[in-house]
Amino acid sequence: MDYMDYMDYMDYMTTIEKLKKRILTISMPQDWLDDGVEQINDAALNKAFNICKELYVEYDIVPCVITPSIEVAVFIKYKNDKDICVTIEVYNNLNTTLIVCDDKEILYFEDIKNMNFKKALSSFLYKEYPIEIPKRLKEELEPPTFVPKDRRGL
């Protein structure tokens, strides 16, 4: 491993550790707890960490906000330079939602199953929401070439 590979690896590990520390230490504000809101459970915290880690490792994106949500969830927000936001919420029952929005409206919503973010990332790509997506994923997500019905030989 040369020096630059080592430095990249150390940056990678530092980011992962910061994400882990930030997420696994989340707790509800005391006034929420006093009002009867449940604490976020360890399973939801661990799932939120695994999601952030996967999105960082696979797509090189890091959340700008990680916080508890009044809905008893971990709230994770990503924002790009064109003010398109991706928010992910991981609930105590481990249900996970992803929302894409701009300043005015919700552009896309999905319940995430089995940690599969490809469909959601596909919607960003085709609607030109500029989330950084590696070239290999862009190629995987390319839509099939459209052939008009009269040229299909039917």
Image: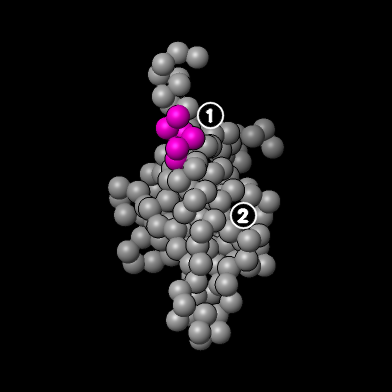
72 with respect to 18 (left or right)? right
Mark 1 belongs to which amino acid? Arg
Can residue 146 be seen from the camera position used here? no
Residue 73 position within the rendered picture, expressed as x and y whole percent measured from the top left = 55, 67
Question: Where is residue 122 drawn, in percent x and y?
Answer: 52, 45
Q: Is residue 26 magenta?
A: no
Which residue is drawn at the image coordinates 45% and 46% (left, top)? 18
Residue displayed at 46% across by 33% down: 12
Which image quadrant is residue 36 in?
Answer: bottom right
Front residue of 126 and 40: 40
For label 2, the crowd category at 10 Å Cα-Cα, with few meaning under 14, some 14 to 19 and many 20 or more, is many
Q: Is mark 2 on a helix, strand or loop?
A: helix
Q: Which residue bears the numbered disc 1?
A: 136
User: Residue 64: in sight, yes or no?
Assistant: yes
Q: Give the residue number, with chain letter if any, for mark 2.
A: 47
- Residue in view at x 45 percent, y 21 percent: 6
Q: Give the range drawn in magenta.
A: 10-15
Query: x%, y% of residue 111?
Result: 61, 61
The residue type indicated by label 2 comes to Lys
Q: Give the distance between the C-alpha atoms of the residues marked 2 and 1, in whole angstroms.
A: 25 Å
How many numbered marks, from 0 up? 2
Sequence order check, earlier mark of 2 and 1: 2
